[in-house]
Image (cartoon, grey):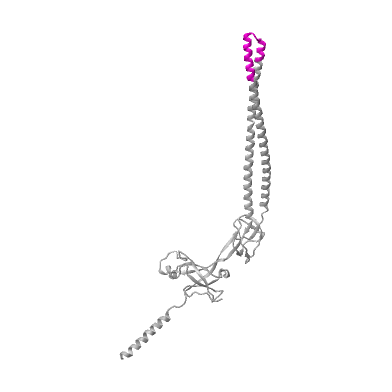
Amino acid sequence: MSRKSIIPILILAAAAAAAVAYARRDHSTVYFTGFVEGEERVLRSEVSGRVIEVRFAEGATIPPGAVVALLDDRDIQAKIRSKQEEIRVIDADLHTQEERIALVDSTWEREVSARAADVRQAEAAAELAQRTLSREQELVKTGASTAQLLDDNRSRRDQATSGVERARQILARTEAEGRQVILAQTELTALQRRRALTEAQLEELQVLLSKHTIVAPPTGTTAQTQFIWPGELAQPGTAVLSVLDPADKYVQFYVPVTELHRVHVGQRVGIELDSNPGHRTPGEISFIADKANFTPEKIETRSDRVGQVYRVKVRILENVERMQPGTEGNIYLGSDNRTAER
């Protein structure tokens, strides 16, 4: 065979080999099977009570902070009224005690002032009687006065001295009566503490009363499952209703260890659910687990290692409200992810 005829044959063989190799390449988009999940919140009772009403049925839209269920609170209401009446009685006692203290205090101060004046008057009289007695004694020595007058002045001096002692004793007793003011103030302080304690108990009852009303989260939600019905008895921790935030959903899938290099946080993906075939919703990988799932108890072979998978979560970027939890579908990787025309 001539050289000119060999060259075309080699070129044809190389082209055929390249064609076969290209045909054998896997041109399919890499994808994984996943499913939609939502973070349900279970509203529970914090107290014991009979259910009066559950206001939202399964599937109903619940406004933010709406009252979801009511428990019988008549016993708490009665206790609250009792505490409120107790506070009113204590307030009346406080008012009476304050008036009593003001009256006793003002009266006591006047009495002390009057008794102190009596002491000063008695002391002045005693001093005068003593000076008169001293002069009389000098007069008796010179013979200008009689012994009778001296005895009379001595008697008046003694009476004045006794008057001073009595006045001082009365003043001391009056000052001692100030303890009644201290006692009354102590009783007032006790009443104030009792009121503060009763008010704290009332606040506790009001907090307990508020727990008989079960409210929805501060964001709009949808009722999922009703666990209890009117007439049934709820206990602390009893589930009443589960709710789901329509926007709080994500897609979850599992990646084998051999494919883990294909995914990374922040990567864009396309979500095609079985309920809407042919339509891909954009998403973004937000989480990749650090540890593998379904790990055998004892890894001994390579097949054990490659059998491990890693959990991956995808944030849904559009139309998250339309996706139903539990719906399965495909999550497509690669640069050809796209959203089909609506």
Bounds of the magenta segment: 126-153
In this picture, is 164 found above or below 109? above
Residue 302 spot, x, y in % from top left: 40, 69
> The C terminus appears in which quarter of the rendering?
bottom right
Q: Residue furthest left?
A: 2
Quarter the N terminus occupies: bottom left
- Which is more toward the observer, 135 or 278? 135
Identified at 64% across, 34% down, the residue is 181
Q: Quadrant of residue 224?
A: bottom right
- Magenta region, mostly helix, strand or loop? helix
Residue under the image location 62 percent in, 17 percent down? 131
Is 25 situated left or right of 86 in this image? left
Residue 173 location, x and y as percent? Answer: 64, 28
Of the pair 47 and 171, the residue shown nearer to us: 171
Q: Is residue 145 magenta?
A: yes
One can see residue 251 in this view = no
Vertical comparison of 159 with 207: above or below: above
- Answer above or below: position of 80 versus 216: above
Q: Residue at x 68, y 41 (%)?
A: 95
